[in-house]
Image (cartoon, rainbow, N blue to C red):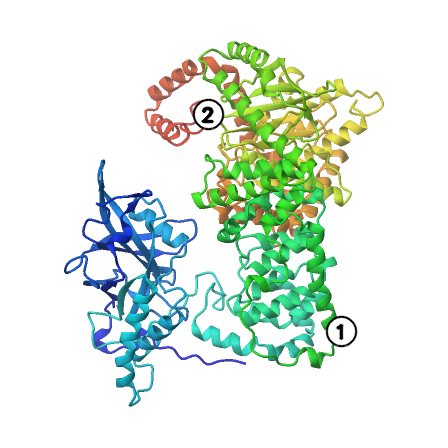
Amino acid sequence: MELNQTCFHSCDLKEEFKGKSALPHIQILSLTGFKPEDFKTINGQYNSLACYGEVRVAYCITRFFPLTMHRFGPWSVIRPTRDNYSDPVLFNENFEIPLAYCYLYDFYGISFVLCSTYTDSNGVHDQYLGGCYLRLYNSKKVFRSGVYELELHLLKNYKLKSLDDVVECIVDHEMDGKPRGLKELNHLLKVRRKQIRGELVATPLDQKTLSVVEPRIEELKRGSGKMFLRVKFEFSRSYPSLYVPVVFKYPVMPGLDEDARPEKWNPHDEMYFKMTRNIRTVAVDRERIPNKEMLERLKAIIESGYGEVLSEKDGDLIWQFRFYLANKFPETALATFLLSVRWQYPEQVSQAVELLLSWSPSCVSPEAVLELLTLTYTHPVCRRFAISRLQEASDDDIELYLYQLVQALRYENHEEILRSSKIPTLGVDSEDQKEKEGVALKKTEGKADEPSSVRSRPRSKRPALGPDDIPWKTDLATFLIQRGRGKFRLANYLYWFLHLEAHEDTPSTSEVKAMFSHVLKRFMAALECGSEEHRSWHSDLLNQTKFVNGLYELVKRVHEDASKRIRKMEILKNLLRTEGASLTQFERPLPFPVDPNFLIATVDADSATLFKSTTQPASLSLVSPEGQLYRVIFKIGDDLRQDQVVLQMIRLMDVVLKKEMFDLHLTPYIVLAATCRHGFIQFVKGVRLSDVNREEGCILKYLQQRAPSAKDPLGLQPKVLETYIRSCAGYCVMTYLLGVGDRHMDNIMLTPEGQLFHIDFSFILGYDPKLMAPEVRLTKDMIEAMGGAKTPTFNNFVNICVTAFLSLRRHANLFLTMLSLVQDAGIKDIARDPMKARDFVKERFCLDETEERAAHRFASRIFDSIKAIVPEVMERIHTVMQYMHLRIWFKWSCLCRCAVDTCPQSIVLVIIIILLTWPSRPQDALELIFFYLYFGNCD
């Protein structure tokens, strides 16, 4: 069915109005219900000089954007026309919004703050009494018109220091100006506005009823005991004879189809969906079977790629064939179906819930529902359905996704989380929850046996679906706590991930930190009030915190010493000998946060050392009760969260490949960020390729000495060669997909067993401090260790790379989901531009091309890296810079002096390089300058 829509355009106005901007006009009339004696308490103490100054109303235009400042434009303040203590307090202030209607989107509103002053021993201070906000467009997307009585919510329980703090508070706590709990008052105000606008048919009774309505409104206002600010919205003060309703509709964005689906809808859309997606169409939709052409179209929509905009036509098509898709493509079509649902319409929500209850659970894997926990899917039906499927995931799978699941708490309903008790219902374990949710599934299965005529019978109008009506009861926070109570390894990582997000140094808003802190307290309370085993876990986690904090203070004292590295190492060993025992003085051996399976008895002081780097991380050996050693790097001064996420992605890729019986012998060591300033790195025994080249000459000689073989043509044991080829291929693929930068020979390691692996992931997603860095880091020395580029061994290497790439490409949505879940965590290269980060990974997976073309493209990147010359030159320069180290300034100054003597304009480029690169990467700045001055041509 097609609906013809007729709109009134501004071009149809009379000639006298064309080419002019109409500015919305607002009038602040009066304040009722204000009692100064109600605001005489400051910080819990009575103050006679509180609310003593002149009462004022401040207002500003407000934007309802998540994670941004809400105020738009400056604050304006108005004062009453007479004494403060009269009731009502009259203002009669007129002002125009300094934005024409064509610039006012539906995310704009206006905030009002009632303020005064109070005096104490420190002087005169501003006192914020009440506040509220009101969106400029109503629920029908029509610009407001008429008189509104806005409820001013009390602010005395909030510690607010400025008007900007107030507007953040009233928006974050949803202090809407519409009166709450006053149904009759809201109804009378709404009808009165309609009558004033001429939307109601005039009757002879109007004159009599209006004389009763006004006193009744005043009576209801005074009886509520609340403060009300009367505000009047007018179309335009400049054109008093002109009034037209302003309906908001999203413009068509460039680059999108004309029917691209906006996030919110105008009244025409609402009517369309009420007519085409009601209960009467269920019987027809249930029997729909697409023809060949339609089926290809449906598959194209489903496979269009993660995060693509779903147009109106595509959304309608998915909705019409939702029953067919649920049966034939339950896993791949799930997320697309939920995108097609218009969640603002209760009828569609109810139908979606009924279909989800019958959705085949055995065909939807846990990794497929992770996408439903991203910011795109905010409705509780989507999120709780995803949790119901995650209940089936194993502990190993949950551990793989745990950091992302913790980050997904950002997109939950924070108020609902904060309202929940610190101690969850301990009797409801995950098994019990599955049982309860299974009841709903069984009921639905029973309905499926009914005849279609019975199931499709029109029903009475349904109320809106509330939180209690959702059949899946477990929210994400409760799910994480339940799984954490099931296994200590999960409890360990859950504790440290929550501890990290709640820490004061983590770059998040106070509201988000409060939410994470509350979940952490709930989790610890659940352990403390649990069984004896849970109480021991609670004690272990607290002792871990003491151990990490004590170790941080100890290593920090070493770093604060101004001595050289050798002297600092002696200080570190002495501190560990004298104070190290106190770090592990607990009733029983302590599970190590990085690997809870390892128990710490003590820290070996004699083997402690400091690495040669800017931050000088400490290398420590932890000793178990049985005498086993666990080497770990403790780093201060760096944010390890980016390394943690990259290595988690590599570990996930390794698991995905191993499930397909494809082992690449990767080394996904563990990184655990305790805070944004320090953390642990698991130590893996290996040697840098730069040291291999310097000491052995090449990789092949190094491996030949560690694993010689007289029978092999390369003089190398076949198992070691196979391990080297596969690990090299694995990291070539994964660093390419993640765009890992700064790949020099100091960041690539090699073990005697032939395992090659990468370290230091300070640059990802295409960011690289080096000039013309290759997309795949593959040096000639690496290829020579395989026998050369024209050997069957190298062809086998390329085949392994392409096979791994295609295997991971089939799971691209999983990796894009993992990336999307951490986009707001403040991780450096992801937070720069989350949309760009997602698009970068999509481009590397080449999702817009066929599998054959994607494989050919990736293979060409491998061969391009072999031919690249600049990376080899930059690597040699990097090596030279390492050798020069202490004498670099003398060498560099000589080069600069010679260059300026022969070519004065070269100093300009030197200065530009210093300004752009020096503050963050001084070593790279020197390398770039050296490269230019040595190889540059001043002609």
* Position of residue 59 measured from the top left corner of the image (x, y, whole percent): 27, 56
**Residues packed near mark 1 inside 10 Å, few (<14), some (14 to 19) or many (20 plus):** few
Q: Residue furthest left?
A: 82
Choose between 184 and 287: the one closer to the eye. Answer: 184
Residue, disc 2: 935
Residue, disc 1: 449
> Which quarter of the figure is the N terminus placed in?
bottom right
Foreground: disc 1 or disc 2: 1
Looking at the rendered structure, the kind of residue marked 2 is: Phe
Q: Residue furthest right?
A: 711
Q: Image point 68% across, 75% down: which residue? A: 286
- Helix, strand or loop at label 2? It is helix
- Helix, strand or loop at label 1? It is loop
Q: Is residue 349 left or right of residue 36?
A: right
Q: Image point 69% across, 58% down: which residue? A: 436
Q: Is residue 624 left or right of residue 186?
A: right
Q: Picture quarter containing residue 528?
A: top right
* Position of residue 351 measured from the top left corner of the image (x, y, whole percent): 61, 70
Q: Where is 486 relative to 810, above or below?
A: above
Q: Where is 539 relative to 9, above or below?
A: above
Choose between 13 and 629: the one closer to the eye. Answer: 629
Q: Image point 33% across, 58% down: which residue? A: 132
